[in-house]
Amino acid sequence: MIQFAYFSACTMEHILRVIVGDSQPLLKRWQKLRETVFQALIFPMGLVVSSVFWVLFNYDRSLVYPDIVDRYLPPHVNHLMHTSVGVVVVLEMLLRPHHYNHRARQLGILLLFCCSYLFCYSYTYWTRGLWMYPLYYHLNWTQQQLMNVLVTFIVPSACYLLGEKTANVIW
């Protein structure tokens, strides 16, 4: 969902550029915001979604996407949701210059987002007794907490640093 919002914002930026020109202060602020959002959220979370999903899916599909889901969500939609987000952000990184700065601030934004997602995820379980990902039914409490640390802090931070390193090498 955040990827859709981001690429909609990119489209809006192009429309603004045509309407008001490149040098307008509004456009400059919009570009700065867009760049911060890409670096702090879009790139790392696109990689997290694709990599974590496909690693678990290939290990044991039932842990993240049980067969019964195919009745309601066809396989091509699954690919659209879990593959395209990774591919599109990598293409964006390779085709458009990105200059990373403010690492601490951007990692803070990323980790705040991840903690918010973890809270919503946990709240769903606390209020409804249902895990959104079947994997959690197979884990004990300690393993669940380790998984939370892995997917909330370690993997997203590593993906952010990968994006920063990639941008510095390419651009």
Image: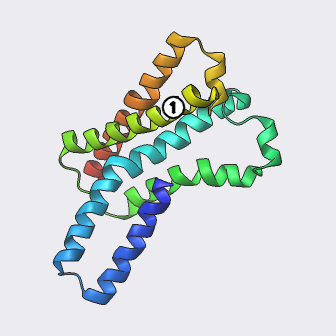
Viewer-side residue, 147 vs 103 = 147
Name above or below for residue 71 compared with residue 20: above
Element type where label 1 sits in the image: helix
On the image, the x and y values in percent for residue 138 come to: 66, 17
On the image, the x and y values in percent for residue 35 come to: 29, 59
Left or right of 105, for residue 146: right
Residue type marked 1: Tyr
On the image, the x and y values in percent for residue 131 come to: 62, 29
Viewer-side residue, 120 vs 48 = 120
Residue 171 visible in rendering: no
Which quadrant, please, contains the C terminus?
bottom left
On the image, the x and y values in percent for residue 78 come to: 68, 49
Residue at 31% from the left image edge and 39% from the top image edge: 161
Q: Which residue is mark 1?
A: 123
Viewer-side residue, 166 vs 86 = 86
Residue at 33% from the left image edge and 38% from the top image edge: 112
Name above or below for residue 27 compared with residue 34: below
Quadrant of res 133: top right
Mark 1 crowdedness (10 Å alpha carbons): few <14, some 14-19, many ≥20 = some
Quadrant of res 152: top left
Residue at 50% from the left image edge and 22% from the top image edge: 147
Residue 168 visible in rendering: yes
Name above or below for residue 133 compared with residue 1: above
